[in-house]
Image (cartoon, rainbow, N blue to C red):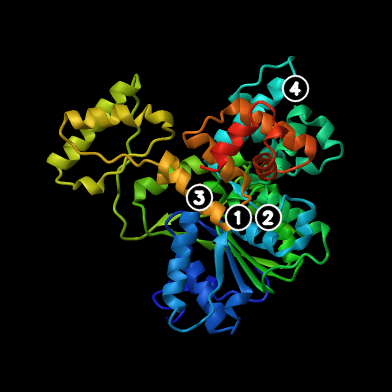
Amino acid sequence: MVWDKDLFEDQKEIASHFGCHALLIAGPGTGKTLTLTRRVLYLIEEQKISPNQILVLTFTRAATAELRNRVFDSLSHSFQELPRICTLHSFALRQILLNSKMREILPQPIRIADKWETRNIIFEDLKGILNFETSEINYTIPDIKRNFNLLSTDWQTLNAEKEDWEKNFRDPRFLAAWRHHRETYGYTLLSELVYQLKRGLTQYEDFALESDYLHLLIDEYQDLNKCDLAVISALKDKECEIFASGDDDQSIYGFRFAHPEGIRRFKNNFTPSKEYNLKKCIRCDRKIIELANFVAALDEHRIKKPLECLDNAKDGEVNILRFSNQNHEAEGVSLICDFLINKENYKLGDILILLNRDKNRIFSSILENSLKKKNIPVEIQITSSPLDIKEGRMLLSFLNLLINPNDNLAIRTLLILRDTKIGSVISSQIYMLARKKNFTFSETIYKIMDKPSLISRFGKRISIEMQK
């Protein structure tokens, strides 16, 4: 595909930028993803940059999939090599795996604990360990989760690099217990990957990247936190030309300490650099743009920028409704849907209902019932996966053991989910023996199988269950 096909003039200018760092401020619906895609094509087709010297970092897996598909569809028939397009976490993991220096920092082999393992093994174990070691505090799962959130916060904000950080951490006992536990089970947390990459890039001069990247494109730059931004800065120091895109008005990841000042201070942090704007929204009608601009303007620190609808845009419709409670709200939403479908002849697939939150389906269930009373079918998007059920989780554990017979988390998962007689009490004794002998959990299990007397009361039971 020709890189500038069907682009507006401002999109052509942006996609063909070359020679210094650049920031693209792009509001919603202005064609940012298209422009990023065509910029990749421009670098390869016009500037003859090798695809393996181009790195594109996105914020979510969904954004990665969309951008990757667009680029691959445009290039796959012309080039054997394609640019690396991935999330920052995925990129961090790849670089950590490539560098032996990280063996001094993280348990080996690198094994990322997933959500199920984190909740059902790590959280539960640490609650039991801390309650066993101290009588001053009765730890609960929310307490453990809160401590992990604090730990993640300190990585994201780089507070973990302050002097005496460990002494000043809110719960030093938790920190010590977690470190012993991660060594015994040999895992790394997803939330620490970018921080560990930052440490590798800034502490080791010989820290190698998988390729000699010359061009780095970053999507949703406004959602990067201080740690993410430090990684981008370190890549800049490796002679990467930075092309960042985003919109500080759309910074919605405050819960992970997104730092919109990063995009606001881009010109100060990356010199020389040039700033571009995409201002024509092809997605929204006039009244929607007006409301969006009004809300965005309430932030006095925002980057002042135009966001305009197309000349031929319709007026559109915006209504802000208030209800006394969620039941009345559900009834109101169902009445609107009924009107749109039966009076205005909209299709079911034309209607989308967004919820701010829906823990345990406390909101969607009420909406669903109200819609069904009016004979309106509804599909609730559920985030669970086959890996959340017992059979799927056991299958994943067996697959992990085929890759690594000493996968500690996989062995422990099977002990939990299979019909064994090894409960939390026996598992905690295995863990305590592992700590005492400085073994991993799997090493301890296999030694008990060879010598059941290592755990006098339960050794034979452990050996029998493990041989099933």
Does residue 120 sit above or below 24 in this rendering?
above
Residue 326 seen in this snapshot: yes
The residue nearer to you, when weighing 215 against 409, is 409
Residue 385 seen in this snapshot: no
**Label 1 element class:** loop
Does residue 421 sit above or below 197 in this rendering?
above
Question: Does the residue at mark 2 contact the one at mark 1 (Cβ under 8 Å)?
Answer: yes
Q: Earlier in the sequence, mark 2 or mark 4?
A: 2
Query: Which amino acid type is marked by label 1?
Result: Asn
The local crowd at label 1, few if under 14, some if 14 to 19, many if 20 or more residues have their Cα within 10 Å, is: few
Residue drawn where x is 55% and y is 62% of the image: 86
Query: Which amino acid type is marked by label 4?
Result: Glu
- Residue at the disc numbered 3: 398
Query: Which amino acid type is marked by label 3?
Result: Phe
Please name which of the two marks, 4 or 3, marks the residue nearer to the observer. 3
Q: Position of residue 354 (x, y in %)?
A: 37, 39
